[in-house]
C-alpha cells in the first residue's frame, strides 16, 4: 500500500506540473484504486478534507445547497479543498482514477450551490468538489482590484470591501455564490456602468484538467480568459477571480409594491426606461417582479429599484414611482444592506425552478408573458406551497457595449441587437411529486412565450445561463460562432474532454 501512496503522490505532482500521463500507468496493477472509488485515494492525499456520508461535514455541505433538488443528490464523498494546490491534487487523482475504474470517479464542481436544478453542482454516486473553503477576499494595495475565491458568498465579499469605500460587480442577493455567477455572466446593480460581472474579470486562476494551475488574463491564455467569461464549468476549476473594483458610497434602493391595476403602465414604463431617453441612465438598476398570490388567486408586484448614487426618487424611475404603491422600503444605504434585503425573499431549502428567456425591449411582449403566465399558473393550483413569480430586467445597449471595451466575452450579445430584456420565471414548491407538473408548466410558458415573441418580431437567441432550466441550452444561445470557438478552446485546454464527460453536470459544449 505504501508504494501505491508514494507512486500516486509522485504521479499527481507530475501531473500537476504538466508531466507525463505515463507516470500513472503502474498504479492500476498496484491496486491504488482497487476500492472501486476515488474517495479513499482522495482521503489519503487530502486528509481532513474528504467527507463521507457518516461524517457531519458531508451533511452540512449538502444542506447548504440552495434548492432541495441539489440537496437530495448523494455523492460518494465530498472534497473540500483549502487551496488551488488541493484542487490540483484532487483533479489529478480524479482523472487518474477515471482511467483505471471508468465511470467511478465522475465529479461535480460546486461554488456556493445556487443553481436550482439537480446535478448542476452536485452528483449522485460521484465526487463533489465543494469550493466553499476557497473564500479569500484580497484587496489590491491601490484598491483597483479585489481577488476573490469561488467559494465566497457575495455577502462575505461585500462585508470586506464596502467599509473600504469600494465595490465590485457581483450578486444582488447576499447569499449567492461567486463561482457560478461570474462564470455564467453575472448581473449586478452596477452592470449598466461596468458591464456583466464577467466583463470585470482581470484574471482567472484556473486548475486545468491536467491538474496544472494557470492564470488566464487578457495578455496570457487569452482564449481561456475569453472562454471563461460565460463558459461556466467547461474549462477547468477556477480557484480565484481578480475583479476590477470601483469606488462607491451609499446609494438609494429598496422595494416598492404595486397592485395588479398598475401592470400595463409598468410595462410601458419599463420599455421607456430600458430604451433610454435618449440613453439609458447608467445608475439605474431594476428588477420588476410580478408575483402570483395563490391564496387570493391574483397578482401583485414587488419591484427592486436601485439607483447607485445617493439620490432619492431619480427621474429615471418617475414613471414607476408616480404609480399608486402598496408598500416601500426605499432608502439610502450601502450595498451589503441592500443585498441582505434581497436575500429575505429568496430563502434556501425549498424545491426551486428557474427558467429564462430574452426578448427585444417591448411592453407588448412583457404583457404577453404575463398573460401566458396568468393562464398557466392556474394549472398549479393543486401544488402545495406553490410560489410563482416573473422577473423582468433591462439589458440596455450601454450594458451590452461594455463587453467590447473590456476585451470581449463569450455571451454572444451584439449591442446592435439591443436593447433587450431578460425574463426569469421562479417557481417554489414543496413536494417532489409535483416536480414533473411544475417543469411541464414552466416549459409551456417558455414555448408559448417564444411563439408570442415570433409573432411580435421580438425574439432573441440569448438565454442567461445562470437562470436557465436544465431543459434549456444557453450555450446554443451564445450563437454558433461563439460555440465553435468555445469548443476549440476546450479541445486545446482539455484535450481529453474531462470537463465534458467526467464532469457531466452543468451546461456542456458538446452534444
Ligand atoms: C437567490 C438567488 C439570487 C440570484 N441573484 C443573482 C444576481 O443578482 N445576479 C446574477 O447574475 N445571478 C443571480 N443568481 C443566479 C446565480 O448567478 C446562479 O445561481 C449561480 O450559479 C450562482 O453561483 P454559485 O457558485 O452559487 O452556483 P453553483 O450552483 O455552485 O455553480 C453553478 C455552476 O457553475 C459551476 N462552477 C461554480 N464554481 C465554479 C468554479 N470555481 N470553477 C468552475 N466551475 C464552477 C458549477 O459546476 C455549476 O455548474 C441568483 C440565484 C439565486 C438562487
Ligand atoms: C446525515 O443526514 C442523514 C439523512 O438526513 C442522516 O440519516 C444521518 O444520520 C446524518 N449523518 C450525520 C453524520 O449527521
Ligand atoms: C450598511 O448598512 C447597515 C444597515 O444600515 C449598517 O448596519 C452597516 O453598518 C452599514 N455598513 C457600512 C459599511 O456602511
Ligand atoms: C498568477 O498570477 C498571480 C498574481 O499575479 C501570481 O501571484 C501567481 O503566481 C500566478 N500563478 C501562476 C500559476 O502563474
Ligand atoms: C416616461 O414615460 C413617457 C411616456 O411613455 C416616456 O416618454 C418617458 O421617456 C418616460 N420616462 C423615462 C425616464 O423613462
Ligand atoms: C395574498 O392574499 C391573501 C388573501 O387575500 C392575503 O391575506 C395576503 O396578504 C396576500 N399575500 C401577499 C403577499 O400579498
Ligand atoms: C387572468 O386569468 C383570469 C382567469 O382566467 C382572467 O379572468 C383574467 O382576465 C386574466 N388576466 C389577464 C391580465 O389576462
Image: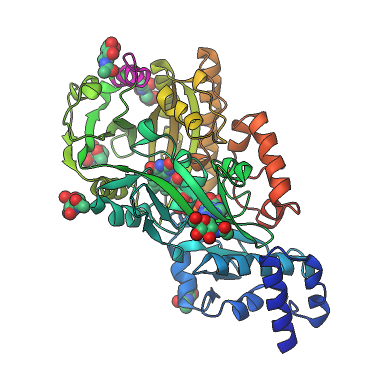
Q: Does residue 484 sit above or below 397 in this rendering?
A: below
The front one of 244 and 429 is 244
The front one of 400 and 256 is 400
Question: How many numbered circles does the render carry?
Answer: 0
Looking at this rendering, what residue extends furthest in the bottom direction? Answer: 2
For the N terminus, the quadrant is bottom right
Asked whether the viewer can see residue 196, the reply is yes
What residue is shown at x 75% (from left), y 51% (from top)?
495
Q: Position of residue 35 (x, y in %)?
A: 72, 79
For the C terminus, the quadrant is top right
Q: Quadrant of residue 223?
A: top right
Q: Does residue 295 sit above or below 47 in this rendering?
A: above
Q: Is residue 29 left or right of residue 115?
A: right
Q: Does residue 476 sit above or below 270 in this rendering?
A: below
What residue is shown at x 51% (from left), y 29% (from top)?
404
Q: Quadrant of residue 368?
A: top left
What residue is shown at x 41% (from left), y 58% (from top)?
152
The front one of 20 and 120 is 20
Q: Quadrant of residue 148?
A: bottom left
Asked whether the viewer can see residue 385, the reply is no
Q: Position of residue 230 (x, y in %)?
A: 55, 40
State which region is magenta. Answer: 266-279
Give the colour scheme of this rendering: rainbow
Q: Overall secondary structure of the magenta stretch?
A: helix
Q: Is residue 338 left or right of residue 374?
A: left
Amino acid at each position: 500500500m505504501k508504494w501505491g501512496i508514494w507512486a500516486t503522490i509522485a504521479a499527481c505532482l507530475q501531473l500537476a506540473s504538466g508531466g507525463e500521463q505515463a507516470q500513472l500507468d503502474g498504479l492500476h496493477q498496484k491496486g491504488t484504486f482497487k476500492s472501486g472509488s476515488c474517495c479513499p485515494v482522495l482521503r489519503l492525499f487530502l486528509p481532513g478534507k474528504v467527507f463521507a456520508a457518516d461524517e457531519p461535514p458531508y451533511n452540512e455541505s449538502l444542506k447548504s445547497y440552495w434548492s432541495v433538488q441539489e440537496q437530495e443528490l448523494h455523492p460518494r464523498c465530498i472534497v473540500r479543498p483549502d487551496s488551488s494546490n488541493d484542487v490540483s491534487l484532487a483533479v489529478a487523482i480524479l482523472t487518474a482514477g477515471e482511467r483505471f475504474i471508468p465511470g467511478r470517479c465522475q465529479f461535480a464542481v460546486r461554488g456556493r450551490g445556487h443553481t436550482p436544478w439537480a446535478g448542476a453542482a452536485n452528483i449522485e454516486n460521484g465526487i463533489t468538489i465543494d469550493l466553499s473553503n476557497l473564500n479569500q477576499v484580497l484587496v489590491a494595495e491601490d484598491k483597483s482590484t479585489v481577488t476573490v475565491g469561488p467559494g465566497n458568498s457575495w455577502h462575505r465579499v461585500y462585508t470586506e470591501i464596502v467599509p473600504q469605500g469600494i465595490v465590485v460587480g457581483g450578486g444582488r442577493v447576499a447569499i449567492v455564490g461567486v463561482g457560478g455567477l461570474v462564470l455564467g455572466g453575472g448581473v449586478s446593480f452596477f452592470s449598466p456602468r461596468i458591464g456583466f460581472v464577467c466583463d470585470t474579470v482581470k484574471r482567472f486562476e484556473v486548475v486545468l484538467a491536467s491538474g496544472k494551475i494557470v492564470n488566464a488574463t487578457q495578455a496570457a491564455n487569452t482564449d481561456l480568459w475569453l472562454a471563461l467569461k460565460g463558459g461556466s464549468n467547461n474549462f477547468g476549476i477556477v480557484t480565484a477571480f481578480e475583479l476590477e473594483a470601483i469606488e462607491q458610497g451609499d446609494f438609494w434602493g429598496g422595494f416598492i409594491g404595486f397592485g395588479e391595476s398598475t401592470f400595463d403602465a409598468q410595462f410601458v414604463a419599463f420599455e421607456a426606461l430600458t430604451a433610454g431617453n435618449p440613453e439609458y441612465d447608467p445608475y439605474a438598476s431594476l428588477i420588476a417582479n410580478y408575483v402570483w398570490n395563490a391564496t387570493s388567486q391574483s397578482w401583485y408586484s414587488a419591484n427592486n429599484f436601485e439607483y447607485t448614487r445617493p439620490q432619492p426618487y431619480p427621474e429615471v424611475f418617475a414613471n414607476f414611482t408616480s404609480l399608486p404603491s402598496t408598500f416601500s422600503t426605499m432608502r439610502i444605504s450601502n450595498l451589503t444592506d441592500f443585498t441582505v434585503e434581497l436575500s429575505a425573499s429568496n430563502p434556501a431549502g425549498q424545491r426551486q425552478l428557474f427558467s429564462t428567456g430574452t426578448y427585444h425591449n417591448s411592453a407588448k411582449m412583457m404583457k404577453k408573458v404575463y398573460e401566458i403566465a396568468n393562464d398557466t399558473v392556474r394549472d398549479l393550483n393543486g401544488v402545495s406551497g406553490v410560489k410563482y413569480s416573473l422577473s423582468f430586467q433591462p439589458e440596455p445597449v450601454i450594458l451590452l457595449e461594455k463587453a467590447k471595451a473590456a476585451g470581449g466575452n463569450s455571451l454572444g450579445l451584439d449591442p446592435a441587437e439591443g436593447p433587450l430584456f431578460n425574463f426569469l420565471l421562479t417557481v417554489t414548491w414543496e413536494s417532489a411529486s409535483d416536480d414533473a407538473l411544475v417543469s411541464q408548466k414552466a416549459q409551456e410558458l417558455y414555448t408559448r412565450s417564444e411563439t408570442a415573441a415570433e409573432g411580435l418580431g421580438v425574439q432573441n437567441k440569448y438565454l442567461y445561463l445562470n437562470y436557465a432550466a436544465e431543459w434549456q441550452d444557453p450555450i446554443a444561445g451564445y450563437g454558433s460562432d461563439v460555440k465553435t470557438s468555445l469548443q476549440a478552446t476546450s479541445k486545446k485546454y482539455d484535450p481529453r474532454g474531462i470537463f465534458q464527460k467526467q464532469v457531466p453536470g452543468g451546461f456542456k459544449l458538446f452534444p
